[in-house]
Image (tube, rainbow, N blue to C red):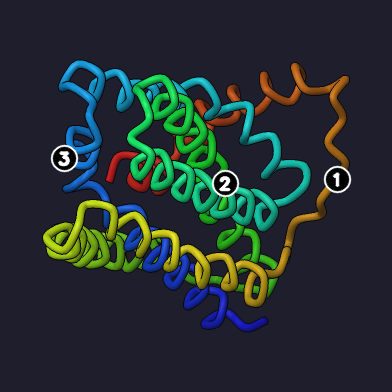
Amino acid sequence: MGQQRIIRTYLAIGATTTLAQSLIWGVNTLFLLDVGLDIFEVMVVNAAFTVAQMFFEVPTGIVADTLGRRISYLLSCSIILAATVLYLGLGLLEAGPISFALVSVLLGFGFTFYTGAVEAWMVDALQAVGYEGRLEPIFARYGMVFGVSMLIGTTAGGLLGQLDLWVPYAVRAIILVPAILIGVLWMRELGFTPRPLKVSRFGEETKRIASAGIAHGLGDRVVRFVMFA
């Protein structure tokens, strides 16, 4: 696997996942209101997603650092796909706020498997094939891909929502399929050796990842740029 293929895979992952994510950003509140929730219940559902991301961020990082970055990415896309289908189904059934909040927790859980895993995969893979260039230009290109994909996704989501508010969710689920295929077909664990995930070491691994995140995340200029971009 060559350097350019690794970079192209990294950018392709960014494009497909960002496009899928952003399709519902502009219509989610309208969708929830349309299926019968009031504005307070919508806020609770959205808060459930945010709290889940905060709660699971470090624990799910253990998967990427043990079983592998590729596994973590595939888990993320698969969970988000399943949760999106459930979310859509709840909307068609006009379910209550508790059901939507639970699925929002599942969505937040899924997103945390993605955080940092793809960047770590790209860096490990490039180092394994002898890449000697700077990483900042690659992260900058990813930032541009992210911005363009987000613009396309939010605009397309709004247009699709004109047809019906459930349509952007269905399209998101469809786009997540090629996102999963990219991980299955193109991602290879280079420069990283997966190891078993032991329940007995879960607490130790969680503490290690939290400490490493502070030291290497906030303390590294390149990583800090990606975190706050």
Quadrant of the rendered image containing residue 36? top left
Question: What kind of element bears circle 1?
Answer: loop
Residue 79 marker:
2
Tell which tag, 1 or 3, sits nearer the viewer: 3
Label 2 or label 1, whichever comes before in sequence order: 2
Residue identified by numbered label 1 = 195
Residue 60 marker:
none
Q: Please give the name of the residue rendered at 18% of the width and 33% of the height, measured from the top-left corner.
A: 33
Badge 3 amino acid = Leu
Q: Position of residue 179 (x, y in %)?
A: 51, 67
Tell which tag, 2 or 1, sits nearer the viewer: 2
> Which residue lies most toward the front here?
93
Label 1 or label 3, whichever comes before in sequence order: 3
**Residue 196 seen in the figure:** yes
Left or right, 185 with reference to 46: right
Q: Please give the name of the residue rendered at 28% of the width and 60% of the height, measured from the top-left corner.
A: 167
Residue 30 marker:
3
Quadrant of the rendered image containing residue 92? top left
Residue 37 vertical position relative to residue 149 in the rendered view, above or below? above
Tell which tag, 3 or 2, sits nearer the viewer: 3
Query: What separation in Å lies between label 3 and label 2 (alpha carbons)?
Result: 23 Å
Residue 193 vertical position relative to residue 149 in the rendered view, above or below? above
Q: Are marks 1 and 3 in contact (CB under 8 Å)?
A: no
Badge 2 amino acid = Ile
Badge 1 amino acid = Arg
Question: What kind of element bears circle 2?
Answer: helix
Query: What separation in Å lies between label 2 and label 1 (alpha carbons)?
Result: 22 Å
Mark 1 closeness class: few <14, some 14–19, many ≥20 residues within 10 Å: few
Quadrant of the rendered image containing residue 42? top left
